Image (spheres, grey):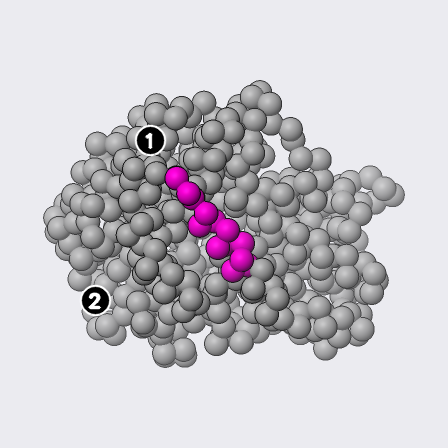
Amino acid sequence: MADVVLVYPKSSYIEAAMLHFYPPLALLNAVVFVAQSFTVRIIDQRVDRDWRKHLLEELATKPLCVGVSSLTGEQITGALEVSRIVRQHGGVPVVWGGVHASILPAETLAHPLVDFVVEGEGEIAFLKLVEALRDKSPLAAVPGLWYLEGGKPLHNPCPELVDLATLPELPYHLLDMRHYIVDFGGEPMFAMESSRGCPNHCTFCFVQKTTSQRLWRALPAELTVERIQKAHRDYGVRGIELLDLESFINPERLKLFCELLIKADLGLFWNACARVNDILRLDREGLALLERSGLRRLALGVESGSPRILKMIRKGITVDQVRDVSTRLAATKIPPVWSFIAGFPTETSEELRLTTELIVHLLRENPTAKSSILHCFRPLPGTELYDTCVEMGLKRPQSLEEWATYEMGKIDFPWISKEMQHRIAALNFLSLFIDKKYVEVDSPAVRLFGQVYGPLARYRFKNEDFRWFLEPGLKQAFLALRRWS
């Protein structure tokens, strides 16, 4: 049995149609040093149907602690269930980390099921905490730790940001990697981190609130390629997904990375995330280099087709620039995935229409392009737009349970009229099927439905024709079937 137990909570309803997932990098990073001196068990709710049984088995041997990581939203529900089980059966400390705990550490610590909160990066902090629990030594030396002493919340200063190049290889041996090799276009793909942070200032993004993410840091290009080659050798993968907030910040590193991949001659593909501005900096030769290096999917955040909304959220781009980049990418073999959000505060019906029209244009211009699911904007605490939303009537959640209701389908915000809520909900469902992103879903039933329903979904989305719109009931039926099975 393990000294340390970490549990990764399930989250989105989309997971119900998946059999393989990206690895829980937040947990692997948290124990990158811990695993060198302690035994560690990682339990993933997404892949382990007997996770409660396995957690209880570990609790019976009294580990030093149980940790969970969570984003703001529905993942909190799973994390709370873990915490409740530990409190009822374990009698061991519960540690929370991740984005939500880092955004609201004091509020997270105030919950009766939480004993410790690690704010920010956990590699050093979690090791120091586990050592302190083992040695029963003072907690004041644990960087970034929030804890109670005499009923009073205390907070230790956060540690200096880690140099990614100094971190050991992640302890993938703690996972059954069969669950974490994703099928992408019929080929096995592995997900990894090559950088952290984002230097941009979008008014809706959690990066504003988390000190560990405001500074962009990256692995050297040479080390990144070495780790890609190792994943290829160890797991037989044919592709790599870089789970970075932004992979294109440093043009020289990007150029060297591409050249090294080409030189390695492994025939691997890679996927990454960039900004429209990054692509505008590249000339024709730069795009050709990306293409030769095997870039197969490029995620690009647009968020809105409204010039006013783009300025309000400080995206730093224009609609004309988006169209320009679309035209450039259409001349290559690099498929873009454009991300969009509906329901920003003060967004008008016509501005939402500008967004859907831009999506239709981008998909029509480039048959290889895809659009993200059109989710409704969710205000995150600590962001500039969150304060605007409070002024517009948003009732601030007062507990972890209330924050858990911030699930991906939430649209009942005070600044969105009932008519707009209905419209956004319909567009959200239709956006699942307006391109071929459904082919990346594991469920054969979902893929078949997407193939058959796609033409109607595209017609409804383009024309906003919601007459006899009964399709969302199919989603609820599917989720009920998955829960029953």
Residue 100 is situated, as x and y percent measured from the top left of the image, at: 60, 45
* Residue at (18% x, 38% y) in the render: 324
Residue that label 1 marks: 353
Q: Amino acid at mark 2?
A: Ile
Q: Is residue 220 left or right of residue 99?
A: left
- Of residue 344 and residue 317, the one placed in the foreground of this image is 344
| Neighbour tally class for label 1: few under 14, some 14-19, many 20 plus, Cα within 10 Å | some
Q: Amino acid at mark 1?
A: Arg
| Neighbour tally class for label 2: few under 14, some 14-19, many 20 plus, Cα within 10 Å | some
Residue 130 is situated, as x and y percent measured from the top left of the image, at: 71, 62
Q: Quadrant of residue 301?
A: top left
* Residue at (31% x, 54% y) in the render: 454
Q: Quadrant of residue 32?
A: bottom right
Q: Is residue 29 visible?
A: no
* Residue at (70% x, 53% y) in the render: 80
Residue that label 2 marks: 262
Magenta stretch encompasses residue 477 = yes
* Residue at (37% x, 64% y) in the render: 447
Q: Is residue 193 left or right of residue 370?
A: right
Residue 83, placed above or below residue 460 = below
Q: Which residues are magenta?
A: 466-479
